[in-house]
């Protein structure tokens, strides 16, 4: 594991569990995979708690096929693949991050700006819209880039990495216009 995965493991593995992935998944609520394809099988998903959440994001092949995960009892399945719902992909963030950063002439893309992008994406789906197959917007949702650009530019201004003063609302409006040309 790299230093970032080790850091997350320290935070998320408070009981200091050890063993194989098969052993560690037993009785868990969530699996977040960012490793290699086909390392999780249906028995492993069945061993998890009821209504488990599977985020199998290895590309091009996820840790488990989304259909197999659902059939094995996962309630919510997210994947890096574009042919399934709940696609987790950096394409959701980058157009808006760059638009927001460029429009204020940011000297850096800092953590606050990245968190702002994630927050913007998360806020796009209302509680009423939320469903098992819709926990993250689809990549071609035209609301994403404008909202991300707005939030990122605001974070850039708040953290003083901007070199140009323009309101985040104006950046959102300009981004919406770019998408409808």
Image: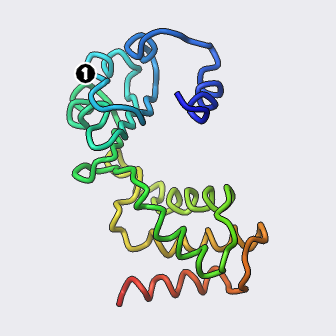
Q: Tell me the quarter of the picture where residue 172 sits.
A: bottom right
In screen coordinates, is 178 left or right of 1? left
Q: Position of residue 100 (x, y in %)?
A: 58, 75
Q: Position of residue 65 (x, y in %)?
A: 23, 34
Q: Residue at x 50, y 70 (%)?
A: 96
- 71 or 58: nearer the viewer: 58
- Snapshot colouring: rainbow
Q: Residue at x 46, y 70 (%)?
A: 95
In screen coordinates, is 87 left or right of 145? left
Q: Residue at x 34, y 31 (%)?
A: 36
Q: Residue at x 30, y 37 (%)?
A: 62
Relative to 167, is 10 above or below?
Answer: above
Q: Tell me the quarter of the picture where residue 142 sits.
A: bottom left
Q: Tell me the quarter of the picture where residue 151 sits.
A: bottom right
Which quarter of the image is occupied by the C terminus? bottom left
The residue tagged with tag 1: helix, strand or loop? helix
For label 1, the crowd category at 10 Å Cα-Cα, with few meaning under 14, some 14 to 19 and many 20 or more, is some
Q: Position of residue 17 (x, y in %)?
A: 56, 12
Relative to 143, is 51 above or below?
Answer: above
Where is mark 1, residue-wise?
42
Total of numbered circles in the picture? 1
In screen coordinates, is 151 left or right of 87? right
Relative to 75, is 10 above or below?
Answer: above
């Amino acid at each position: 594991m790299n230093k970032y995965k080790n850091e997350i493991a320290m935070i998320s593995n408070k009981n200091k569990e050890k063993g194989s992935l098969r052993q560690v998944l037993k009785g868990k609520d969530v699996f977040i995979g960012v490793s290699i394809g086909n390392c999780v099988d249906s028995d492993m998903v069945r061993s998890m708690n009821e209504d488990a959440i599977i985020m199998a994001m290895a590309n091009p092949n996820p840790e488990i096929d989304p259909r197999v995960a659902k059939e094995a009892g996962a309630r919510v399945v997210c994947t890096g693949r574009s042919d399934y719902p709940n696609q987790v992909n950096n394409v959701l963030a980058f157009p808006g991050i760059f638009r927001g950063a460029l429009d204020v002439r940011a000297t850096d893309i800092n953590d606050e700006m990245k968190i702002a992008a994630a927050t913007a994406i998360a806020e796009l789906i209302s509680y009423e819209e939320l469903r098992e197959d819709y926990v993250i917007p689809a990549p071609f949702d035209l609301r994403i880039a404008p909202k991300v650009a707005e939030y990122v530019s605001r974070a850039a201004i708040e953290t003083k990495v901007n070199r140009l003063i323009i309101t985040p609302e104006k950046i959102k409006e300009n981004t919406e216009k770019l998408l409808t040309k």
